[in-house]
Image (cartoon, rainbow, N blue to C red):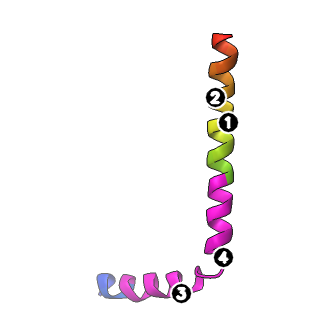
Amino acid sequence: MLEEREVPSKNSDSRKEKGPSKIKQILAILVFGTIVFTMILKVFLATS
C-alpha cells in the first residue's frame, strides 16, 4: 500500500515541478557556483 501511494505522489510532484524546475536549477547553479568560487578564493589566498 505504501509503495503504491509513493509512485503517484512522485508523478504528481514531477508534474508540478516542471514549471519552477528551471528556477530550482538556476538557484542550484548559483549556490554551487558561489561555493566553488569561495573555495577557489580560499585556495588562491592561501597559495599567494
Report if the CB atoms under discs 1 and 2 are less than 8 Å apart: yes
Q: Which mark is residue 40?
A: 2
Magenta-highlighted stretch: main secondary structure?
A: helix
Give neighbour class at mark 2: few <14, some 14-19, many 20+ (Cα, 10 Å). Answer: few
Q: Earlier in the sequence, mark 3 or mark 4?
A: 3
Q: In the figure, residue 28 lies in which quadrant? A: bottom right
Residue that appears at 65% across and 13% down = 46
Which of label 4 and label 1 is nearer to you? 1
Question: Considering the image in quadrants, where does the N terminus appear?
Answer: bottom left
Which of label 1 and label 3 is nearer to you? 1
Residue that appears at 64% across and 66% down = 24
**Image check: 39 left or right of 14?**
right
Report if the CB atoms under discs 4 and 2 are less than 8 Å apart: no
**Circle 1 residue:** 37
Real-space Cα separation, disc 3 to disc 2, in angstroms = 37 Å
Measured along the vertical axis of the image, is residue 8 above or below residue 41? below
**Image check: 15 left or right of 36?**
left
Q: Amino acid at mark 1?
A: Phe
Helix, strand, or loop for circle 3?
helix
Real-space Cα separation, disc 4 to disc 1, in angstroms = 25 Å
Q: Let me know if residue 16 is in the magenta part.
A: yes
**Circle 3 residue:** 15
Q: Amino acid at mark 4?
A: Pro
**Circle 4 residue:** 20
Residue numbers of the magenta segment: 6-29
Helix, strand, or loop for circle 4?
loop
